[in-house]
Image (cartoon, rainbow, N blue to C red):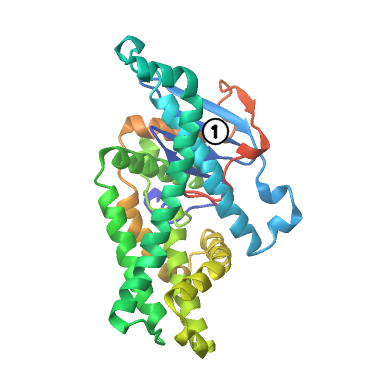
Amino acid sequence: MLAKKQKKPCKYSSVGGQALIEGVMMRGPRGTAMSVRLPNGEIETEYKETKPWREKCKFFSLPLIRGIVGFVESLVTGYGYLMESAEKATQGEEENPEELSKLDRWINDHFGEKMMNAIGIISAVLGFALAFFLFLWLPSFLVDVVTRGTLLKFHALFEGIIRVIIFVLYMVLVSQMKDIHRVFMYHGAEHKSIFCYEHGLPLTVENVRKQKRFHPRCGTSFMFVMILLSILISSALVLIIPGLAEVNRALWITVKILVLPFVMGLGYEFIRYAGKHDNLFVKILAAPGLWMQRITTKEPTDDIIEVGIASLKAALGEDETVQTQPRQPESDPPAFGEGNAQ
């Protein structure tokens, strides 16, 4: 009987999360918890009362708009949690000051925190630049090479196919990195823990271990849905506005950037719908994202599952030993993230 019940969640929940460096962040009804495995083997859990951006302004909660706001919020706050987990996971592993050169010590003393902030900003800028190059400019360039710069009726479809191929290859390559592989294991623990909760089972390592690691509300599924929607919308624009067939690549890319917010909004609404329904339409559109999770999630070990359980229990308010800490408004938890049901 239990096996039959586990074919799909027994309830829709507002719980979601994100895999971190040696940790998991979980968002519950009233706040966010982050659990990190420290170098000494202990699990440090921190709970923070938070409020999603869309609850601070009625306009942000409107259909389509809430998807755009949630996506931006998840990028901003998700990056903050990621950096915080990286700092906690490396506590006690700093270099011995005596082994540093005079120049290194001087830089560390005078620009340590500022340097880290600058590195974080540069990393974010480079990340956006890489995403723009791989998923917007490169597909358009490759199709232009074949079509000699002319936009055809099926130009957007060809671009989309190339974009999917690049996305899959990119994820396969990064998954081979040791550190990323461990993050994907924590990603799997996050999904399994949420599934265990949605099935109404006690949050134990044994129960979590039995769950699937492929969740329909995963951020990976959202990215794939966005790619598919961008193909459909871009193709429709070329058919509706014949003049687009005469524009150059720069203008065409600008058009695609302008429709991205609309694509984000639609993608969010679909993921939200998919989390509540299990019909044929949902299964067809969700299938590519679930297939991709075979790459972006890995089977977690028991010690990694323990971290996911600790984070989820704290987010649900079931761990009374965790001390609640207020978080500043600009650091609220993501309203849209890995496995998030928002």
Q: Establish if 88 lies above or below 127.
A: above
Q: Position of residue 154 (x, y in %)?
A: 39, 84
What residue is pinned by disc 1?
33
Q: Establish if 134 lies above or below 335.
A: below
Residue located farthest toward the right when viewing the structure as drawn = 58
Residue located farthest toward the bottom when viewing the structure as drawn = 242
Disc 1 crowd rating (10 Å Cα; few below 14, some 14-19, many 20+) is many
Q: Establish if 238 lies above or below 295.
A: below
Q: Establish if 135 lies above or below 114.
A: below
Q: Is residue 193 visible?
A: no
Q: Is residue 232 visible?
A: yes
Residue located farthest toward the front when viewing the structure as drawn = 103
Q: Secondary structure at mark 1?
A: strand
Q: Residue at x 48, y 53 (%)?
A: 9
Residue located farthest toward the top when viewing the structure as drawn = 98
Q: Position of residue 324 (x, y in %)?
A: 62, 25
Location of residue 105 by image quarter: top left
Q: How many numbered marks have been drawn onto this rendered protein structure?
A: 1
Q: Is residue 112 left or right of residue 94?
A: right
Q: Is residue 327 left or right of residue 189?
A: right
Between 130 and 45, the one lying in front of the other is: 130
Q: Residue at x 42, y 75 (%)?
A: 249
Q: Position of residue 61 (x, y in %)?
A: 69, 57
Which three-letter amino acid code belongs to the residue tagged 1? Answer: Ala
Q: Residue at x 45, y 42 (%)?
A: 122
Q: Position of residue 313 (x, y in %)?
A: 52, 32
Q: Residue at x 42, y 54 (%)?
A: 129
Q: Is residue 173 left or right of residue 72?
A: left
